[in-house]
Amino acid sequence: MRGIATADAAYSFLNPEIGQLHNPFAMLGMAAAVDRVEQAIVRCETILLYGDYDVDGTTAVVLLKTAIELLARNNGCTVRFHVPHRIREGYGIQSAVLESAAAEGVRLVISVDTGMRAFAEAKRARELGLDLIITDHHLPDAEDELPVALAILNPNQPGCTYPEKSLCGAAIAFKLAIALLERDDQRKGVSRTRDKTIYSFLKMVALATVADAVPLQGENRVLAALGIKELHRPAGVGLRALFKCAGIDPAAKQLTSFDLGFRLGPRINAAGRMDIAAEVVELFTTRDSARAHTLAEKLERLNTERRETEANALREVEHRLATDPSFAERRMLVMAGENWHRGIIGILASRIVDRTARPAIVVSIEDGIAYGSGRSIDGFPLLESIETCADLYTRFGGHAFAVGFALPAENLPEMERRLYAFAAKKLEGQPAEHVLRIHAELPLDRVTPVLAGWLRKLEPLGHGNPEPIFVARGLQLVGPVRRMKEKHIRLELTPAPSSVSSATAIKAAPMKAVGWNMAQRASELSLDHGSIIDLAYKIRENDHPQYGGLQAEIAGMELVTSR
């Protein structure tokens, strides 16, 4: 099901290793980029790294800043960085920042996780005498037009034969960092980068790769798997402080993509959503334990604030979904609100997709400007859809699954008209429904610690490498449905007597199953002691002292017979 058809391919998939990474110099523009950075180091120039405010952008800045400073130790070369403020500046390179940098003597600017559509800004950089290197993973303009720059590092640009096309921005910055360090190793006749440095860098790459939801296949899988392994030994004081605030002890548990995507990632992203993302760079580069602890605690507070802001806005979103009949007719949803916090509109779009199984765009209108963020579903090219409105925007960009833009609020009705027409045509004949993809039929008595151990080798799981969902049929509840916090349920299940011999049924120990946000579904099915169900589930290993051991996490259930 993952496109792996040979033993060799299976071995490589299950055993990611450093030798599976591609040569960074296979990326178009890499040699020119490395030459110019080396020149800046020799000349003791000041280099400006221009980042983005999410996990991908901030970790990319950390990687390049660390690599260049390693090469420029004590020679006078200075590495500065600029991470834009989401509200005051918005996404992308700003000419005003370039003008200030040029006035202060900067001659080399390297963008990370941004720049592919910065046509005017690239032109302004040239006018100012700035050399611009763009490192980005977002898709180029629909006409394959590229900004004018000294070098562009993006596997998606025309003419680039680099094998992995779906790297995140931090992974591309990592490639530049490794190319710089390996060339320095070659010059000195050592192998420090391959033997040591690359592993410490992979920690940041793994965080960004998982948090940015790029497909966890091919080289991305290797980067994430090796980085997660290295995160078990967080050497930096910033990482250790972040783990502590998130309540994670990497020495005591096996980290998974879930920990990165849903526990660490949101805390890092909270800085860019609610405050100043530049402090994330400081967190990961400081050597002061007290300062790191202060910054990590601030991220924790910001993440709490983000959750509260999101919950308030989500109540309004859900009310409008329930009461506005026009939404039921649309194949794509565009929802606008006055002064919704721009830091959460992308999350709101994701929540709408989760609830409706339709692509969604959420717009915040502020002082006559509409700021939008969108999320998509499988098979719907979201960037292509908003490109039909290119003449309406002041700026836009993204990829197939996520986009962002700004436009005059007066253009909103026309944008909605074009997007609805595009979606109606593109999704014609496709029902808007959530699809639960079952990977295999697996009776509960086949769930063993050995199987669970093998399934762990599929990690890291996520987009492009989904967690296996199994189905077991004819299961009987051996007790009442236990509710937890009114939203969740806990069941105990055994094979129904009709599906197995009576002797087997007597011997079979009940399997515990937990269903998050499944209380309403249990009520709809009128589940009770003795009910027989078919269960879609994931395998979990619970270390709780009371509920420990193997258990099933409910992904879906259907009633076969009631009591």
Image: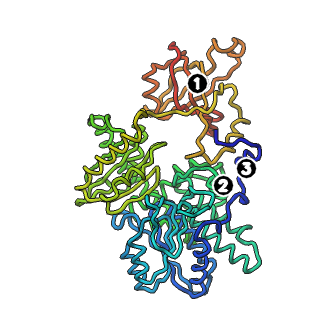
In this rendering, position of residue 365 left or right of residue 437: left
Q: Is there any visible trace of residue 398 in the rendered image?
A: yes
Numbered badge on residue 222: 2
Circle 3 sits on which residue? 12
Estimate how packed mark 1 is, as few (under 14), some (14 to 19) or many (20 or more) residues with alpha carbons within 10 Å: many
Name the residue nearer the viewer: 231 or 342.
342
Sequence-first disc among 3 and 2 = 3
**Can you give x and y, in whole percent of width and height, for residue 351 in the image?**
40, 43
**Can you give x and y, in whole percent of width and height, for residue 347 in the image?**
41, 49
In this rendering, the label closer to the viewer, 2 or 1 = 2
Q: What residue type is labelled 3?
A: Ser
**Can you give x and y, in whole percent of width and height, for residue 486 in the image?**
43, 31
Q: Are marks 2 and 1 in contact (CB under 8 Å)?
A: no
Query: Residue 195, relative to residue 317: is it above or below?
Result: below
Q: Is mark 1 on a helix, strand or loop?
A: strand
Q: What residue type is labelled 1?
A: Glu
In this rendering, position of residue 417 left or right of residue 1: left
Estimate how packed mark 3 is, as few (under 14), some (14 to 19) or many (20 or more) residues with alpha carbons within 10 Å: some
Sequence-first disc among 2 and 1 = 2
Circle 1 sits on which residue? 492
Q: Do the residues labelled 3 and 2 touch (CB within 8 Å)?
A: no
Query: Residue 554, relative to residue 139: is it above or below?
Result: above
Name the residue nearer the viewer: 110 or 483.
110
**Can you give x and y, in whole percent of width and height, for residue 20 in the image?**
71, 57
Q: Which amino acid does label 2 sit on?
A: Val
